[in-house]
Every structure is written in structure tokens, then in C-alpha cells.
Amino acid sequence: MLVVHGLWMTGLEATLFRHRIAQRGYAVRQFHYRSMTVLPPVVLAELDAAVRALPAPVHLVGHSLGGLLLLRYLQGGGAPGVARAVLLGSPVNGSRSARAFAALPGMSIFFGPMAGEELLRESRPRWDGPTPVGVIAGSHSLGFGRLIGHLPEPNDGTVAVAETELEGAADHLVLPVSHTGLLAAPEVVEATVRFLSSGRFAAPPP
């Protein structure tokens, strides 16, 4: 499995998440990229190389901007060994809080080309590729997004649940966690593992 971090992050914030996933029997690797400076074609090529270096089947998990990067990678064809992908708090329809932050004087420089293309747009993409994609959103409103602009309810403090709704996704789940809590909550790990094994977030009937 390959885990992809979000904007302004390094992957260290996902240490506990990776550890818990590994305890469930998965070989887990972290993909790091320079979220503020790297150009989209460069990071996509680096991601492709990282995916192809792993034995198939490869599962992908991306948090926030990392999930948008994964979706863009899959939309471009991805690699044949990719089995399933999970997006954690990823604003596939654009981010209102990011647009509000970028509109402040001098703040747009903190996004860079990749985040600028993925977070600041307003669109509703549709996923129709062969890889099952699941989306987990948070509904505990605790995060910087509340400080810079009104977010639609419910939200995780940074991303609104409505912003994570991906047409064509195999499943969508809302859990009572914050944006950063998506990487710390045990229930997110359990839901992720269920999706990777079955393609659905719900537990199978007894």
C-alpha cells in the first residue's frame, strides 16, 4: 500500500495511520512530494514510479490534497497493478476554505502549482475508471477552515462533506472526526481496511 500526504505535510503526520494499517497485515509505504513547489507532471511521474516499484496489487490511500493527486493519477491511466484507492477528506469538488485563504493578501504563494490546480478550482468531476475508489469524509468541525470563512455543514473543520462527494465512487462514508483526525481515528483505519478488502466501507452481514 502507498500512502500520500496532503498540502504542507511530509508524511510524518500519517505515522500512526500507517502503523495501524501495517498491524492489519498490509505492507505500507509513504510517498513524499514537495507539495508547495513541485509541478504536477513531475509529481505524477514520481508517483507512477513509486507505484510501479511495489508488487501488485497496490492499494492507494491519500489524505486531503494527496487524495486529489491519487485521483488525478488514476484519471491519467495509473498503473495496471493498482487495486483500490481510498481518499481521506479530499475536496474533489474544490475547497472553499482554500479559496478563502488564497484570496488573502500574499497567501496564494503558499499553495504552489499542484495545490493551486486541485484545491482552488470549482468543479464536480466524475470517476468512471476501473479502479474502485472509496471516499471517507469527516464531520467533526475542528480546523483552520473555520477561521477564514464559512464552511457548509457538515464539515471536518477544513473540508465540507459535500466537497468530498465524488460521482462514480464505489462508496462514501462520513465519520465524526476532524480533518487531521482522519489520520488518527481507529474507525478510519477499520473502514479503510474494509474497503481495501471488499470494495465497500460497511461491514459484511454476519
Image: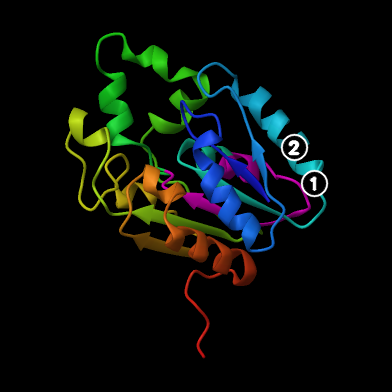
Give residue 51's position: percent from left, percent from top.
74, 42
* Callout 2 amino acid: Ala
Rendering quarter of residue 59 = bottom right
Question: Which residue appears at 68% of the width and 49% of the height?
Answer: 28
Question: Which residue appears at 69% of the width and 35% of the height?
Answer: 47
Question: Which residue appears at 52% of the width and 25% of the height?
Answer: 114
Q: Are marks 2 and 1 in contact (CB under 8 Å)?
A: yes
Instruction: Decide: few, some or many residues near mark 2? Use Cα within 10 Å; few <14, some 14-19, many ≥20.
Output: some
Question: Which residue appears at 54% of the width and 29% of the height?
Answer: 10
Range of the magenta residues?
70-90
Give residue 16's position: percent from left, percent from top.
52, 47
- Residue 166 seen from this side: yes
Tell me, yes or no, whether the highlighted magenta stretch contains residue 21: no
- Residue 128 seen from this side: no
Residue that protrudes farthest toward the bottom in the picture = 206
Tell me, yes or no, whether the highlighted magenta stretch contains residue 75: yes
10 to the left or right of 182: right
The residue to which callout 2 is attached is 50
Q: Give whichever of 122, 98 is nearer the camera.
A: 98
Q: Is residue 162 above or below residue 99?
A: below
Question: How does the figure colour the protein chain or chains?
Answer: rainbow
110 to the left or right of 190: left
Label 2: element kind: helix
Label 1: element kind: loop
The residue to which callout 1 is attached is 54
Rendering quarter of residue 147 = top left
Instruction: Decide: few, some or many residues near mark 1? Use Cα within 10 Å; few <14, some 14-19, many ≥20.
Output: some
Q: Give whichever of 161, 53 is nearer the camera.
A: 53
* Callout 1 amino acid: Leu
